[in-house]
């Protein structure tokens, strides 16, 4: 049976390190940093690690309905989503994922764009 990206890079702890790096970058971002001003980061990192893990073949799963409900009130734009993707790509590169695995990961995230983005550009 083929190995998932989740398994290939070390499972939950490895994905958690990627997510922590992503949030370090996101918090410093002029584009999306404000979204995290009053957020319980430890809880968010845990949830995001489970979400990314599920997209990469890990054991957790998230329904599209739940994803939409969590993001609905945030007013995330396409530009915000693009910034998130760029920062996630940097985090994945920093943790040594191969280019094909990065493309697969970003494609899985891109497939959720219509659920996460809730506003057009101003």
Image (spheres, grey):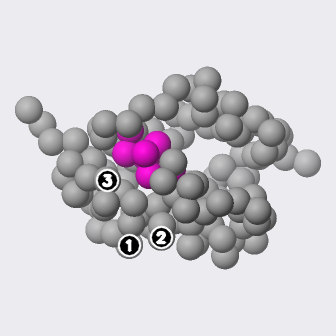
Tell which tag, 3 or 1, sits nearer the viewer: 3
- Tag 3 near tag 1, CB within 8 Å: no
Q: Which residue is mark 1?
A: 94
Mark 3 crowdedness (10 Å alpha carbons): few <14, some 14-19, many ≥20:
many
Please name the residue shown 78% across and 45% down the image. Answer: 74
Tell which tag, 3 or 2, sits nearer the viewer: 3
Which of disc 2 and disc 1 is earlier in sequence?
2
Label of residue 12 in the image? 3
Q: Secondary structure at mark 3?
A: helix
What type of secondary structure mainly makes up the magenta span?
Answer: helix
Q: Position of residue 105 (x, y in %)?
A: 40, 47
Residue 41, picture quadrant? bottom right
The magenta stretch spans which residues?
Answer: 48-54
Q: Can I make out residue 109 in this image?
A: yes
Q: Is residue 24 left or right of residue 121?
A: left
Q: Is residue 89 left or right of residue 57?
A: right
The residue furthest right is: 122
Label of residue 103 in the image? none
Q: Can I make out residue 89 in this image?
A: no
Vertical relation: 49 (above or below) 23: above
Residue 96, picture quadrant? bottom left
Q: Which residue is mark 2?
A: 21
Please name the residue shown 8% across and 32% down the image. Answer: 1
- Tag 1 near tag 2, CB within 8 Å: yes
Please name the residue shown 76% across and 35% down the image. Answer: 72
Marks 3 and 2, Cα distance to the nearest angstrom? 14 Å
Tell which tag, 1 or 2, sits nearer the viewer: 2
Q: Position of residue 40 (x, y in %)?
A: 65, 60
Marks 1 and 2, Cα distance to the nearest angstrom? 8 Å
Which of disc 2 and disc 3 is earlier in sequence?
3
Q: Secondary structure at mark 1?
A: helix
Please name the residue shown 27% across and 48% down the image. Answer: 6
């Amino acid at each position: 049976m083929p190995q998932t990206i989740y398994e290939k890079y070390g499972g939950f702890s490895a994905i958690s390190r990627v997510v922590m790096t992503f949030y370090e970058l996101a918090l410093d971002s002029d584009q999306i940093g404000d979204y995290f001003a009053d957020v319980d980061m430890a809880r968010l990192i845990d949830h995001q690690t489970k979400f990314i893990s599920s997209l990469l073949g890990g054991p957790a799963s998230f329904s599209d309905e739940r994803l939409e409900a969590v993001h609905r009130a945030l007013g995330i734009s396409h530009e915000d989503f693009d910034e998130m993707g760029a920062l996630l790509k940097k985090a994945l590169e920093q943790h040594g994922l191969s280019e094909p695995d990065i493309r697969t990961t970003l494609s899985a995230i891109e497939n959720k764009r219509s659920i996460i983005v809730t506003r057009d550009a101003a």
